[in-house]
Amino acid sequence: MIMTMTIEIAPEIESILQTEAKRKGLSPKEFVQIVLKEKLIVDKKGNRVSSEILRELLAEGMISSIPEGISAEEDEFEPLKIEGKPLSETILEDRN
């Protein structure tokens, strides 16, 4: 299934998009598809995976191909609120 979408982007973003697409020898449409795909790749557990990490693993032969999987769901990350002083302070105190 192919989805068609029209988005409005600021002129400075359009300029960057055009420049990067041309630099890579791609049409703007192809470039946007690649960027979106790389940003939205998820592993089997549903965790987002950095495209840079995937490329490194591929280059090192640890994976045979970059998996395809696109999730439109947004991560709902909420950091835990922990009482007390920061861990970094505790570590520095223990070192002294």
Image (cartoon, grey):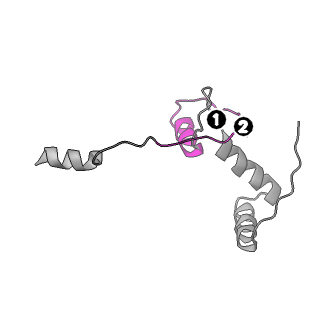
* Amino acid type, mark 1: Val
The relative height of residue 27 versus residue 79 in the rendered view (above or below) is below
Along the line of sight, the residue nearer the viewer: 82 or 70: 82
Instruction: Categorize mark 2 by other alpha carbons within 10 Å: few (<14), some (14-19), many (20+).
Output: some
Task: Specify whether residue 27 is in view.
Answer: no
For the point 82% across and 55% down, which residue is it? 29
59 magenta-colored: yes
Magenta residues, as a range?
51-79
User: Vertical placement of 13 versus 31: above or below?
Assistant: below
85 relative to 3 in the view: left or right: left
Q: Looking at the image, is mark 2 or mark 1 earlier in the sequence?
A: 1
The picture quadrant where one finds residue 46 is top right
**Residue 78 included in the magenta stretch of the image:** yes
Residue designated by label 2: 70
Real-space CA distance between mark 2 and mark 1, rounded to the nearest whole angstrom? 6 Å
The residue singled out by tag 1 in the image is 42
Residue positioned 71% across, 48% down in the render: 36
Nearest the eye: 2 or 87: 87
